[in-house]
Image: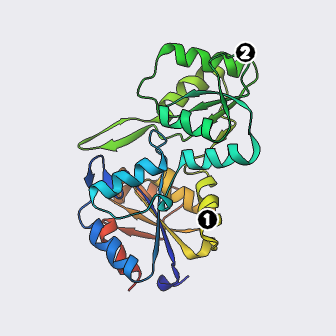
Amino acid sequence: MTKTSYKVILADLDGTVNRGEELIPGVEAVYGDLHDRGIKWLFLSNNAAMSATELALKLRRLGINVSEHQVINSASALIHTVERNYIGKRFIVVGESSLVEAIEHARGTISDDPASVDIVVVALDRTLTYEKLKRAHIAVQKGALLWATNLDATFPVEGCFHPGAGSIVAAITTAAGRPPDRVFGKPYPDMALLALEMLDISASSCLVVGDRMETDILFARNAGMASALVLTGATSRSDVAKYSYAPGHVIESIADIAELFD
C-alpha cells in the first residue's frame, strides 16, 4: 500500500487525540488539514462509560468539530449486536448509566435478578460495588453469557492512569474461572467491521492510529488494516521491539500524521 492510498483514518482517543480533558497539541490543525483534503476521520474508543454521542460532544467541546456519526466506541459495537441478534434478551450490566440506557433503547431488558438473565455485560463502572460484582458472578455461574466492552486494564488521564474496564472484567473472570464469551473493544475487530459497514469501504483503505500496541496496533492487524503508532500515550519507541507484530508507521504524535499523506 502506498502512503496516498489511505482514505480513512480510524483514530483512537485517549492517549492519541486527547489525555482526559486535554487535546494532544496540534491535533486540531491536522484534523482540519486532512479533512479539507478529503480524508475521512472516524474516532474509535474502547471507552463505554460514555456514549458515542457524548464522546462526540466532548471532542467538540475540546475543539475538534466532529459529528456524532464520526465516533464509534465499544458500546456502539455491543449495541449494534444487541439490535441485530439479541432483542428481548435479559441483561445484567456492570457499567455506567449511559450503557444501561443504550441497551434498553436497543430493546434489551435490564434485570437485577441473576437467576433470570441471559447476558452479563461488564464495562467501566465508576459506581462499582461488591453487590454488582456478586450479582454478575452469580448470573455467570447460572449460565449467562459474559460480555465485556473491552479489556483495557487502565486508561490515561492528565498526568497518570486510572483503572479501566479490564480491571473490573478481571475480577469477574477470576471468580468465574473463565474468560468472557465476547469482547467488543479493541483489539477485537467488531468496531472495525462496524466502521467498514458504515462507510462502505475496504479495510485496505483505512489507517488505524493509536498509542497502544496490544489494543490499537493489534486491532489493526486483526482487521486487516494499516496502522500508525503514536508515542503520546502508553507505548514508547523502545517498547515496540517487545511485540511479535509491528505498526506500519511510528510517529511522535498524531499531529505528525499529515506526513503519511504528502
At horizontal 76% and vertical 44% (from top left) the residue drawn is 85
Q: Quick one: label 2, few (<14), some, or many (20+) residues within 10 Å?
A: some
Position of 261 compared to 222: left or right?
left
| Quadrant hosting residue 181 | top right
Q: Is residue 249 left or right of residue 185?
A: left
Q: Quadrant of the C terminus?
A: bottom left
Task: Quadrant for residue 250, please give it.
Answer: bottom left
Q: Label 2's element?
A: loop
> Is 242 rendered above or below residue 36?
above
Q: Position of residue 226 (x, y in %)?
A: 53, 70
- Asked if residue 15 shows in the view, the reply is no
Q: Position of residue 68 (x, y in %)?
A: 46, 58
**Residue under circle 1?**
198
* Amino acid type for the residue under numbered disc 2: Ala
**Element type at marker 1?**
helix
Q: Quadrant of the N terminus?
A: bottom right
Q: Give the left or right position of residue 161, taking residue 148 as reference.
A: left
